[in-house]
Every structure is written in structure tokens, then in C-alpha cells.
Image (cartoon, rainbow, N blue to C red):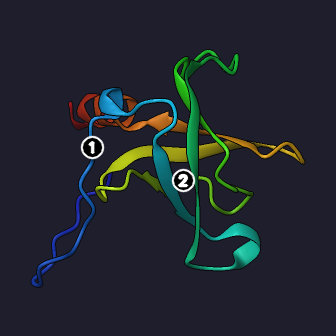
């Protein structure tokens, strides 16, 4: 879903970065609420790019070792410049591997939803 918010006050937001510019080995920061623990911040590196998890929808996930657990899915993954480069989406239990939807894929979906 895409929501439009009308607010009399200015709202703060995070900018999206270009996920195509991210590289394997880049440091990332993930924010979420695992197990209901709001505002949890974790870090890691991009372990791989272009991962196909077989869901048939997103075929180019960003793989990371940042600790992303249930409750953090849908939260942002930032590069060290503070730009969102992914949306946390999948965690493989007990493996230390997580996946994020690249920001460029998210922005393409937003444009489709606007139409």
C-alpha cells in the first residue's frame, strides 16, 4: 500500500539511496523492532547482491550479516551516508544471514503504485 499523508507540520523522513551503488563489503545499519524491542539498531556488511530467494517477485535481494529478526522486517537498511539502500525482508533462522529488498526495487514499486 502507498499512503499519502497531509500534515500541517513538516515531517522528517529518510532519503533513499541508489542500491546499485552499494558494493559487497560495504557496511550497513539496520533498524527495526525485533521481538517488540522498538528502535533496535544493528550493523553488518553487504555479503552479496542479486540473491534470488525463489519467491518469484523479488529476484535481486541484498544479503547481509546484520542481525535482522522477526519484527524488523519492513524496517530500513542504511548505508553509512544515512541513505536507505534496502528494506529488511527475510532472515534465515540461526544462520546470521538476512536479506533486504534493494531501494531501487522499492522505488520502482512505488512508481507503479502511484499510477
Residue at image coords 37%, 34%: 22
Q: Answer whether labels 2 and 1 touch (C-beta < 8 Å).
A: no
Residue wearing tag 1: 17
For mark 1, give the secondary structure: loop
Separation of marks 2 and 1 at Cα, in angstroms = 16 Å
Q: Residues within 10 Å of mark 2 (few under 14, many from 20)?
A: some
Q: Is residue 57 above or below residue 2?
A: above
Quarter of the rendering occupied by the C terminus: top left
For mark 2, give the secondary structure: loop
Residue at image coords 38%, 29%: 105
Q: Is residue 4 left or right of residue 51?
A: left
Front of the two marks 2 and 1: 1
Residue wearing tag 2: 74
Expressed as whole percent of the image width and height from the top left, the position of residue 30 reads 53, 58
Residue at image coords 73%, 57%: 69
Expressed as whole percent of the image width and height from the top left, the position of residue 96 reads 79, 46
Residue positioned most to the right: 94
Q: Is residue 37 above or below residue 82?
A: below
Q: Could you tell which of marks 2 and 1 lies nearer the N-terminus?
A: 1
Amino acid at each position: 500500500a502507498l499512503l499519502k499523508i497531509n500534515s500541517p507540520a513538516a515531517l522528517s523522513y529518510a532519503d533513499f539511496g541508489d542500491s546499485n551503488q552499494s558494493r559487497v563489503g560495504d557496511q550497513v545499519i539496520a533498524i527495526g523492532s525485533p521481538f517488540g524491542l522498538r528502535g533496535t539498531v544493528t550493523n553488518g556488511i553487504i555479503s552479496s547482491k542479486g540473491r534470488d530467494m525463489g519467491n518469484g517477485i523479488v529476484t535481486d535481494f541484498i544479503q547481509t550479516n546484520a542481525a535482522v529478526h522477526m519484527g524488523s522486517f519492513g524496517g530500513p537498511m542504511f548505508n553509512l551516508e544515512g541513505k536507505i539502500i534496502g528494506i529488511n525482508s527475510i532472515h534465515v533462522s540461526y544462520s546470521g544471514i538476512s536479506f533486504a529488498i534493494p531501494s531501487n526495487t522499492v522505488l520502482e514499486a512505488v512508481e507503479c503504485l502511484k499510477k
